[in-house]
Image (cartoon, rainbow, N blue to C red):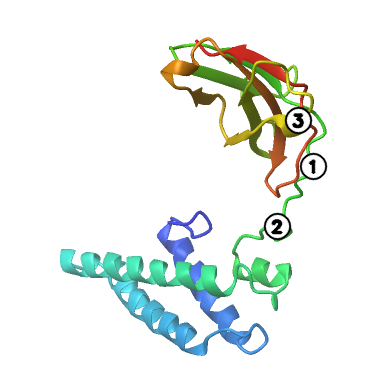
Amino acid sequence: MPSFIPTKEAEFVSWSANLIDVSKANTTGWDLPAAQITELETLHGEFIALYEKCQTAAYTKLDMQAKNEKKALLIKKEEVFVRNNLQNNDKMTDNGRTALRIPIYDRKPTPHPAPETTPEIEIATPLPRILRVKFRAVNAARWGKPPYVHGLECLWSIADTPPAKIGDLLHSTFATRSPLELGFDEDQRGKRVYFAVRWESGTVKKGPWSDIFSAIVP
């Protein structure tokens, strides 16, 4: 059950009635589907009849079962109605959402600035033919990417001499979790691999490249 729908039954009765009444009063202004509101109103009425019967000494186990099934169906329908018609409705104000007793979400996208720093790197050789590149923000306590960063872009090449520039690194790979693992062929063991890395934000904004560094394929 969504957190904004009350779990206590008496509170749910009030919340459901309010949702329907406020939506019904603003059907035109908020451009809401009248047929869905009518369906909710009918279901709510059927649930209330069973709910009130179960408040008396004359109710049966079948009455309680019917009430619970009707409530579950009503909650499901109301959850879908809120999600599809109210939460992101541009014709509504936050005052309207308050009146409906539903959450007010920040609908502005979270900014993802371009990274300004280079990653801190540590190379491990856990197995033959494997290079494991651990990464983190400089001086961070844990390995991994910093906030607003989607992942690490890595350019690399096997070469006999150090590349003169980043553009000389021929291969590209990307990792969203530390470590980045690179595998090599048997005949590449003992050769030197050159790397350069940089952060990339969730909006594909790129940070500065690191210096070129290297490791030997184990």
How many marks on residues? 3
CA gap, disc 2 and disc 1: 22 Å
Q: Which residue is mark 3?
A: 166
- Which residue appears at 24% of the width and 65% of the height? 64
Tell me if mark 2 has few (under 14), some (14-19) or many (20+) residues whose alpha carbon lies within 10 angstroms of its own: few
Amino acid type at circle 1 is Ala
Q: Which residue is mark 2?
A: 106
Which of disc 1 and disc 3 is earlier in sequence?
Answer: 1
Q: Indicate whether 103 appears above or below 168.
A: below
Tell me if mark 3 has few (under 14), some (14-19) or many (20+) residues whose alpha carbon lies within 10 angstroms of its own: some
Q: Are marks 3 and 1 in contact (CB under 8 Å)?
A: no
Which of disc 1 and disc 2 is earlier in sequence?
Answer: 2
Q: Quick check: 179 left or right of 128? A: right
Q: Position of residue 79 (x, y in %)?
A: 46, 67
Label drawn at residue 125: none
Q: Is residue 12 visible?
A: yes
